[in-house]
Image (spheres, coloured by chain):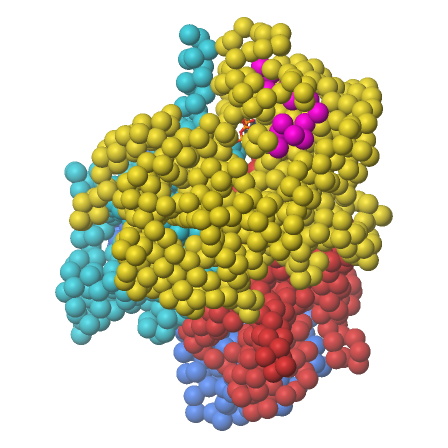
Chain colours: A yellow, B red, C cyan, D blue
Amino acid sequence: MADRLLRMKGIGKSFAGTRVLEGVDFDLHAGEVHILAGENGAGKSTLIKILAGVHADYEGTMEVGGQVCRFRSPRDAATHGISVIYQELSLIPSMRVSDNIFLGRERSTHAGWMRHGSQAKACAALMARLGLDVNPSRNVEDYPISVQQTIEIAKALAFDARIIVMDEPTSALTKPEAERLFAIIAELKANGCGIIYISHKMEEIYRIADRITVLRDGTHVGTATAADLPRAALIHWMVGRDIDEQFPRHAPHLGGVRLQVEDFTVPDPHGRPYPLVDRVSLRVRAGEILGIGGLEGSGASALLNGLFGAYGRILGGRVALDDFPCAVRSPQHALRHGMALLTNDRKTSGLVLSMGIAENITLASVPKYSPGGWFNHGREMETARRHERAFGIRAASLTQTVETLSGGNQQKVVLAKWLETAPRVLLLDEPTRGVDVGAKQEIYALMDRWTAEGIAILLITSEMPELLALSDRIIVMHRGRITAEMSREEATQEKVLEAAMGQRSGVEGVAGP
Amino acid sequence: MINRKTHTIRALLALPFTRALMALLIIVSLGMVFNADGAFFDWGTHRDMLRQVSVYGILACGMTLVIITGGIDLAVGSVLGLMAVTFSILSIRLGVPPAAAILLTLLLGALCGAVSGALVARFRMQPFIVTLAMMVFARGLAKFLSEGKKIPNYVVGPDGSYTEAVPFFRHLDTRILGGNLAVVTVIFFLCVFLSWLVLARLRPGRYIYAIGGNEEAARLSGVPVGWVKVLAYGMSGFFAAVAGICQAAQETQGDPEAGATYELTAIAIVVIGGTNLMGGRGSILLTLLGTLTIGYLEKILSINAVSEAGRLMLTGGIIIAAVLLQRSRK
Amino acid sequence: MINRKTHTIRALLALPFTRALMALLIIVSLGMVFNADGAFFDWGTHRDMLRQVSVYGILACGMTLVIITGGIDLAVGSVLGLMAVTFSILSIRLGVPPAAAILLTLLLGALCGAVSGALVARFRMQPFIVTLAMMVFARGLAKFLSEGKKIPNYVVGPDGSYTEAVPFFRHLDTRILGGNLAVVTVIFFLCVFLSWLVLARLRPGRYIYAIGGNEEAARLSGVPVGWVKVLAYGMSGFFAAVAGICQAAQETQGDPEAGATYELTAIAIVVIGGTNLMGGRGSILLTLLGTLTIGYLEKILSINAVSEAGRLMLTGGIIIAAVLLQRSRK
Amino acid sequence: GSRGGNNVGKKDVFVIGMSQCNLGEPWRVQMDEDIRAAAAEYDHVKVLFKDAQNDTLRQRGHIEEFIRQGVDVLIASPKEAAPLTEPLARAYEKGIPVIILDRAVLGDQYTVFIGADNRLIGEAAGKWLKKALGGKGNVVELKGLMTSVPGVDRHEGFRKGIEGSDIKVIFEADMQWLEPNARKEMESALARFDRIDAVYAHNDPGAHGAYLAAAAVDRQKEMIFVGIDALPNEGRAYVKQGILAACFEYPTGGREAIDTALKLLNGEAVPKKIVLPTRVYTPENIDRGGEAL
Ligand SMILES: Nc1ncnc2c1ncn2[C@@H]1O[C@H](COP(=O)(O)OP(=O)(O)OP(=O)(O)O)[C@@H](O)[C@H]1O
Ligand SMILES: Nc1ncnc2c1ncn2[C@@H]1O[C@H](COP(=O)(O)OP(=O)(O)OP(=O)(O)O)[C@@H](O)[C@H]1O
Ligand SMILES: [Mg+2]
Ligand SMILES: [Mg+2]
C-alpha cells in the first residue's frame, strides 16, 4: 500500500535475559488510528520505545515511509517524523512550559543562541490552538498532572510528525480534556498522520479505533479492524479468556456513619487566597462507596490528601471517625486511626520502587511485623504470599523489586499495602489508573468485597462509567467546593459533568470567590 | 540446560555482592603479584591492614546508614577528631573512669550526628551542606576544647617523670587471639554487626531503605521520616565517636586534627562496595567488602613503598576500575 | 489591595534570588557592626575580598553548571593544582609564550573535566565517585609533573640574584581602574558572564537544566545527554584551569598542593547561593551572590582576627543560618 | 584602638600583627603560644593572630589587612617564600617593621629573619645516628610532606649527615607529618624487613607513630627512634618516656620574635638574620635541658 507509514516485522526484544517481545508485526497507514492493546506488561510500551529509538538493540526490521530504518536515539526517530507521548510523563517539571515544548528541538541560531521570545510566541500560539489556558513562561510543575499531560500532548504535536504515538495519553485526563484530545486526533487523521494509540479504556478504544492490534505476553495475537473485533472478542484476545465485563456492585450493607467531615478546608500551599478545598462537609457510612467527581483543579485530590494528613495538621474544619473527633496531624496519625490513602501516582507517592514486593506490601504496617523492633521476615513473607494470591499479583518472586513490575501489578501491590493496614476508611484516588481490563475487574470486585466487610470508601475516578457504576452516592466538586450531591440512581453522566463545570444543584451554595 | 546455567551465572555476576567481591579479589591478586618480597604473604601484613582500615571501616558503617537514606555525612571525620579530644579530656584531664568516659563520648557523638539529622529532617536542608557545616563546626570545637594542642596520655610526676595516665588507651590498642587480631578490628566487626542488625533485622532498617527509595511514599505510609533520619545521622555520629575513641587509643593521645579527610575515604569505601549514593539500595556487607578493598589497596601501595605521586595516581585509577565493575544497571 | 501587596512581597521573598541577596545583606551588615575599627569601610578591604574570593568564584562557576546537571565535581581543587603546575612548567620551564601556555592549559583542564564527564555519561557512574577518583589522580599527576616541588617564577642568576622568569604572572596579578579592581576579579566576572551565556542564552544551557530536572525525560526528548554532561564537566575543568592560572599568577609559582579542599568551598558557594544539589534548578547569578557571601564571611572573620577555633565554629554556624534562609519549599 | 601614626614611641599600646600560615601542626600552635606568652609579659603589647589555613593567598590577604590596619610590627611565618615576598615587601616599604619567622622569603625587603636551619638539623640527626649506630645499619626514613621546604631540607640534610657511612635507608615513605600515617608506613616497613636498626622521622609525632607500630609487634627494642621538633609535650616528653633515643629541637622563635619586635619599637638595632640555635635531647641530657649543637 502506498500510504503505509510504518511497518515493523518480527520485532523481538529482551531485557537482561527476560524475553519481552517475540516476533511482533505491526504496521500503520496514513490517516488511521491503530490501537495497540494488551494486558499490563504485554510489551506495548516496549514496542513503541523501539519505534521511538529508545531501545536500539532489538531483533527484526522496521520500515518508515518504505525505507528501512534502525533508530539509535530518540532524536534519530524524531527526524524521521515520529513523535511520542510517553506513558510516564517526560516533561521537566523545573523548566518553563515553552522550554519543555521545544526541548531537543530548540529554536536557536546556528551558533546556539536561544530565541526565547520566538519560542514563547510559538508556544502561546500552540496552546491557543489546543484551547489550553497555560502560560508558556511558567514552570511545568506549577500545573496539576492533568494539565501537564495536555502539555505533553502539545509537545508531541508541536512538530510536523507523520507518525504520532500516544501511550495512555488520557490516563490523567478528565472527560472534557479527553474529548478535546479526540478532536485533535480527528484533525490529525484528516491531515494524513498515522496515530498509534495505547489505552486500557474500552470506551475510548471503540470511540477512535480504525484498527486494533493485540499483544499478549510479548507476542502478536492478532490485528483486526475495529468493526470486526467486538468488545468481548478483544478482551478475549487480550487476556486469553472471557471476562464478564461489568461492575460487580452488590447491594450495599450500609452501617453507621463512619467518616464525618465538616467545613474541611485546605489552604493553598503557596499562600494564595483561594483554598484548594473550601469548607467541604460530607459523611460516608460503613460499607458505602462515596464517589467524588470533578475536573482538574477541583480539589478532590487535595481533599483526600488533606483528610489523610499529607499536608500536616488540619487547618480548617472537623473530622470524626465513628463519631470520635479525630484531629489528624500526619499520615502516620491517620493510619493509626484506620485511614488509608491510595494516591493517584503510584510511582512518585505510592511505591518504593527499589524495594521488593513483600517489603512494599508491609510498608504501611511495619510495626505489626516488627514487634519490639525485631523484624519477623517469615510472617512478612506469609502475608505477602496471601496478598499475592488474593490480588493475583504476577511476579517471578516476592523479593523482586517492584520497579520491574508492570503498571497493573504495581497498582495491586499498592492496594495490598493499604489493605494490610486493615483500614476503616479507604481513600482511593484513581485506583484503576493505567490498569488493564482484567486487573480493573479484579479491583472492582475487591472494592465490593471490602465494603461488604464494612470499610467506607471515598473514590475519585476520572472514568465516568466507573464513577457511576461503583459509587453508592456521588458528590461533585468544583474549585474546592461541593456543587452537587446525588444518589446512585439519580446520577447521570450529564448531571455530573454539569456540576463539575461549576453549576450548582441540590447543594447549599456559598458565594463564589 | 546450558543456557539456563549461563543465565544463573549471569544473574550471580549481576549481584552487587558478587561484583564487590570481584573488585576485592582483583586487588588481592594484585597484592599477590606485587608482594614486596613476600611481605604480602605474612599474616602480620593482613592483621595490620585490618587494624589500619578499622577506623575508616567504623566510619563507613555509619556512612552506609546515612547514604541508604539518600543522604551523606561529611562531618564524620571532624566528629571523630572532636570525640577523640572529648574522650581524652574526659579520661586523661578530668579523670573520668574509662567506662563513663566512653559512654559520655558515644552519647555526645550521637548527639552531633542527631543535630545534623534534625536539621536535615526538620528544615529539609540538603545533607551535603548541613554536614559540611557540621564538619567545620566540629573541627572548630575540637580545637577550642583542646586549645589546638594534642592531649597526650601521660601525667608528669613531681620529679618530672612521665607516667601513663589512663591504661585503657593501651588496652584498646592491643591484640587478641594470640596477637593475631587487633582489638580495634574486633570493634570494627562489632560495628558491622550492629549496622547489619539495624539494617537487616530491626524495624528502623526497613524505614531507612524506604526513605532512601522514595521518601514521599514512605511518609505517606506512616514512616516517621524525621525520626529515622535523626536516628541514621545519630548512628553515624555514634560510630564516629567509636572511631574517635579507637583513634585516640591508637595515637595514645587526643588530636584535634585527627580524622581530617577521613569522610572521603569512608564515602569511597561505601561506594566501592556498591551502595548507591542515590539511596534506597545497598547493604553493610557491601561496605565490609569495600573496606577490605580500600584497606588492601592502601596496604599494597604502602608495602611496595610507591611514591606519593604514584600512589595518588594509582588510587584514582583503581577506584575508577573498581566502580566500573560495580556500575549498576540503573 | 493590601492583600495583593503582601502577596507580591511574599512571592518576591520566596524567590531564590531574593533569599540569596538577603543572606548576603545579613553578612554585610555583620561586617558593618564588626568593622574592625573601620577597616570594613575601606574600599581596599572590599577590593581584596573580591581578589581573594575570585579563584573560588571561578571554580564555583563550573561547579554550578555541573550541579545543575544533577552532578558534582570534587576534582576542581586538584585540577586547579594540576593546571597551576602545568601552566608554570610550560611557561617558566619550557619557555612557551604565555598566550600559547594559557591555551594549552585551558585545553588540558577542559580535557580533565571531559574525562570525568565521559565516565559519568558513558558508564553511568556516580559523579561523586568519578570526580573523587579524578581528584586523587590529578593531585598525583600534579606531584608527578612537578616532582613534588613548587615551580617558582624566577631564575637564579650566576651571582645568586633572583630575577623574574615570566612577567606575565605579574601582569595577571595586578589591578586596573586606578588600582581599584584586581585583574583576577575581572576574570572572575568574565567567567560568570560566560556561564550566564551558556546557561541562560545558549542551547546547551537548556539541556543542562533539562538533564538535571529529569534525565530520562531529557533523553526521550532527544537531548544528547552524554555530550551535554561531557560539556558541563569539561567546562568545569576549563574553569578550574582558569582558576589554576590565576592561582599560579598570584602565588608567583606553580604549587602542586594548590587548591586542596577548594572544591568544598566552591560547593558551599553554589549551595549558599541557593542552587539545589538535586539539579535542575539554580542560576549563575545565585552563585555570584553566594561567592560574595562566602567572600565577606571570610573577610569579616579575618579582619577581626577571630581565633581559628572561633572562626571554624562561626563559619559552620553561619553556613547553616544562610542555608536556612534559603531552604526551598520542596 | 591604636591605628595609624608614625611616631611609635609615643603610643601606649603597640599592636603586633602575627600571620601564621597554618595551625594544623602542633609546632605552629606552639609558635603562637610562645609569642602569646612572651607578649603577655609586656602590658603595652597586643598581638593579633591570624591563621591562613595553609593557603598562600589567604596569608597574602592577612598581610594586606595588617598593612591597611597599620600595625606597628608585622610578624609572619610564611607558607611560601616566593608568593609572599611581594606582599611583605610592600609592608616593609610602608615602613612597617617586618619579622619573618621560620621560613625565609626571597630578596631582602624585610627587617629581620628569625629561624633555624632545617638542613643543619637534618644533618645533625644524620651524624648523630651515624655515631649511635656505629656507622652502619638499616634505617627507615619517614618523611614529612615532600612538597614542603622543611621536608626536603630535613631529608637532604639527613642524607648528607649519613654520607660516607654504611647506613642504608631501606624504606622511605611520605607520612605527610601525620602520626597515623607514620604508623601505617612503619607497619609496612616492619612487614618487609626483619632487621631495622633505626627510624628517622621528620617530626616527633612521626617517630612516635613508628614506635607504636614497632611496639605493637614487640620490636621496639630492636631499633632506636629519632625525631625532630622537640616540643615540650611531644618530642621531649617522648624522650623522657624512653620512646625516642633522640630528638632535635626546631625552635619556634616565638619569644625571639617578640623580643626583636620590642627592640625595633624601641629603635634599637637588630641583625638582619637571626639563626636560632638548636639542641639535641637524649635520655641522658633531657633533665639537664638538652645539649646545644
Ligand atoms: N527497562 C526495562 N528493563 C527490564 N524490564 C523491562 C524494562 N522495560 C520493560 N520491562 C519489562 O517488559 C515487560 C513489558 O513492559 P511494557 O512496559 O512494554 O508493558 P506494557 O504493555 O506497556 O504494560 P502497561 O500496560 O502496564 O503499560 C514488562 O514485564 C516489564 O517489566
Ligand atoms: N499543603 C500542600 N502542600 C503541598 N502540596 C499541596 C498542598 N495542598 C495541595 N497540594 C497539591 O495540590 C494538588 C491539588 O490537587 P487537586 O485536588 O486540585 O487535584 P484534582 O483536581 O483531583 O486533579 P488531579 O486528578 O489531576 O490530581 C494535590 O495533588 C497536591 O499535590
Ligand atoms: Mg506501557
Ligand atoms: Mg485528582
Relative to C76, does residue A308 appear above or below in the rendering? above
Q: Can residue C296 be seen in the rendering of this structure?
A: no
Task: Tell me the quadrant of ligand 2.
Answer: top right
Kindly give the residue lying farthest to the right in the view shown: A372
In the rendered image, which quarter is residue B4 located in? bottom right
Q: Residue at x 80, y 78 (%)?
A: B177
Q: Can residue B301 be seen in the rendering of this structure?
A: yes
Percent coordinates x, y for residue A134 in the rendering: 37, 28
Residue nearer the viewer, B222 or D209? B222
Q: Is residue C189 left or right of residue A327?
A: left
Relative to D134, does residue A181 appear above or below in the rendering? above
Percent coordinates x, y for residue C57 in the rendering: 34, 46
Percent coordinates x, y for residue B143 in the rendering: 58, 49
Q: Residue at x 20, y 55 (%)?
A: C170
Percent coordinates x, y for residue A80 in the rendering: 28, 54
Residue nearer the viewer, C164 or A166? A166
In the rendered image, which quarter is residue C160 located in? bottom left
Q: Is residue A284 left or right of residue B33?
A: right
Tally of numbered discs: 0
Q: Which residues are magenta?
A: A466-483
Q: Quadrant of the N terminus of chain D?
A: top left
Kindly give the residue lying farthest to the front in the view shown: A228
In the rendered image, which quarter is residue B60 located in? bottom right
Residue nearer the viewer, C325 or A32? A32
In the image, residue A472 lies in the stretch drawn in magenta: yes
Relative to A293, does residue D167 appear above or below in the rendering? below
Q: Residue at x 18, y 53 (%)?
A: C171
